[in-house]
Amino acid sequence: MVPTGSPRAKSRSRQRRHPHYLEGLKGYNPCGGTGFYLMRTERQGKELSPEVLRQLYWDKKRSLSWIADSYGINITSVLKRMKKYGIERRSLSESGYLFHSDKPGFNIKTSLHPEEEKLLVAGIMLYWAEGTLKRDTIDFANSNPRIIKVFLKFLREICGVNESRLRAYIYAFSDQNSDKIKEFWKKTTGIPETQFIKPYIRKAENSTARKRRMEYGLIKIRYSDKKLLCIIKKWLEEYTKNIGRKSG
């Protein structure tokens, strides 16, 4: 019997409050393989052989601190092994590049209040309807500013995306003012102009009716992160299965 006030009991309580489609994400790799998701305790106590150390450091681009922490040793021990095994160290420029490129592209919020759960469902449903599922990037296109705002709110508040990696593509007709359209979407999305890609301008041919429906053209939001796309797909799969069970 677990005491009510114990950390373990509190942890279970928090887990029960999470939406079911968020459960089990820790340690789960929806894109396949293990790699990053391999639990630390599974590596600790294992021998750090020359082959494994070389593979982790050079092939998989792991940091010294990552290797040390994973095998339950300190950085000095890793460095001694590298010297003993004749494994060269990366240059300062290579280490700097890896430090910046290896930063997480998102930070998913797992403890959600009811309004955030609604936003999560809205986000995955919108992506199901208007998003691209067959590529390795998150691509979401629409002409409705309110829909775009909701989807961006989902990316920012639920998925915790890196703002600097958001990209915006504008599609408009040649007889529309592309500068005015870009200014409108800049204010609507909060994405800086430097992250807007050159607009795609289509030749206007009998487009009067279409222009009325798309006064500010169409905007596509792109976020290049295969792992996040896999997680969104998993949410969608779990949520639709749950809806199917309830309706059955």
Image: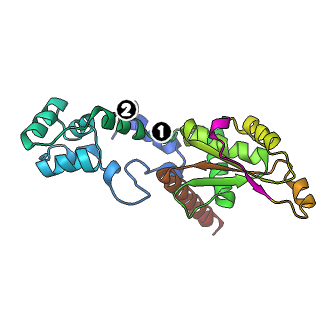
Tag of residue 14: 1
Residue at which label 2 appears: 7
Q: Amino acid at mark 1?
A: Arg
User: Does dot 1 land on a helix, a strand or a loop?
Assistant: helix
Crowding around mark 2 (Cα neighbors within 10 Å: few <14, some 14 to 19, many 20+) is: few
Vertical relation: 63 (above or below) 123: above
For the C terminus, the quadrant is bottom right
Crowding around mark 1 (Cα neighbors within 10 Å: few <14, some 14 to 19, many 20+) is: few
For the N terminus, the quadrant is top left
Tag of residue 131: none
Name the quadrant containing residue 186: top right
In depth, the one of 235 and 220 nearer the eye is 220
**In the image, is residue 220 part of the stretch drawn in magenta?**
no
Vertical relation: 1 (above or below) 201: above
Instruction: Provide residue 40's location: percent of width, then percent of height.
Output: 26, 43
- How is the rendered protein coloured? rainbow
User: Does dot 2 land on a helix, a strand or a loop?
Assistant: helix
Residue 117 in view of the camera? no
Instruction: Provide residue 198's location: percent of width, then percent of height.
Output: 68, 47
Residues in magenta?
Answer: 192-202
User: CA–CA distance between discs 2 and 1?
Assistant: 10 Å
In depth, the one of 105 and 4 nearer the eye is 105
